[in-house]
Image (cartoon, rainbow, N blue to C red):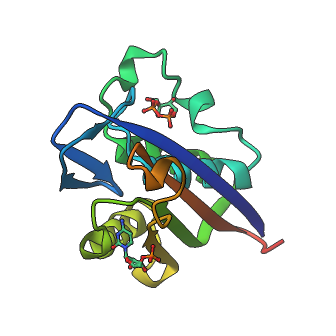
Amino acid sequence: MRIGHGFDVHRFGEGDHLMIGGVAIPFDHGFVAHSDGDVLLHAVCDALLGACALGDIGRHFPDTDPAWAGADSRVLLRGVMERVREAGYRVGNLDATVMAQAPKLAPHVEAMAGHLAADLGVARDAVNVKATTTERLGFTGRGEGIAAEAVALLVREAADA
Ligand SMILES: Nc1ccn([C@@H]2O[C@H](COP(=O)(O)O)[C@@H](O)[C@H]2O)c(=O)n1
Ligand SMILES: C[C@@]1(CO)OP(=O)(O)OP(=O)(O)OC[C@H]1O
């Protein structure tokens, strides 16, 4: 078995929605990013890549590559899963936390977890998505952006080691 951790931050800029976990959430800002800025999916990508000792999302999908401009981060996540499978692993379970003072994410976490389960190729109960404010502390608390963390457990496809 292997464990990986991912962390990502995107700051707010102009826009009218946020992409988080593949869900478009209406908001008075968007994310500043090369891709769609899906902070949760980027943290998940890094957790998966970390568990395989394959570096991070920027190594596989550079933010200097026009191919990823405005990219749907679910496409990046599926690309990461191809690499996970090539390395001989499948996902055991995933747990993630999104740190956001606003918007309210609880109404959307079920849809986010459903997207993740589909893209990771696991049952719905192998995925958990949580949201927390940071009690108005720090950059998330001041409403400057959103952070996300993820932890993934990978299992060897052939022999569990
Ligand atoms: N952006 C957010 C942040 C939090 N929630 C939900 O509210 C609960 C309480 O938040 P605390 O920061 O006081 O822990 C939390 O457990 C989430 O369910 C949310 O929906 N959206
Ligand atoms: C995802 C990539 C690629 O489009 O760009 P961003 O959307 O800016 O996101 P970031 O979390 O900075 O990660 C790495 C990038 O390579």
Q: Is residue 139 left or right of residue 24?
A: right
**Picture quarter with ligand 1:** bottom left
- Residue 102, quarter of the rendered image: bottom left
Where's the N terminus, which quadrant? bottom right
* Residue at the (78%, 72%) spot, across then down: 159
* Residue that extends furthest to the right in the rendered view of this protein: 161
Q: Where does residue 156 sit, x and y in percent of width and height? A: 73, 67
Q: Where does residue 6 sit, x and y in percent of width and height? A: 63, 53
* Residue at the (39%, 26%) spot, across then down: 34
Vertical order, 107 against 82 (above or below): below
Task: Please tell me which residue lies in front, 84 or 106.
Answer: 106
Q: What number of labels is visible?
A: 0
Residue 89 visible in the snapshot: yes
* Residue that extends furthest to the bottom in the rendered view of this protein: 125
- Residue 35, quarter of the rendered image: top left
Q: Where does residue 21 sit, x and y in percent of width and height? A: 36, 57
Residue 80 visible in the snapshot: no
* Residue at the (68%, 66%) spot, across then down: 154
Q: Is residue 132 left or right of residue 74?
A: right
Vertical order, 93 against 136 (above or below): below
Q: Where does residue 131 sit, x and y in percent of width and height? A: 43, 70
Vertical order, 51 against 96 (above or below): above
Where's the C terminus, which quadrant? bottom right
* Residue at the (19%, 35%) spot, across then down: 15
Q: Is residue 29 left or right of residue 84?
A: left
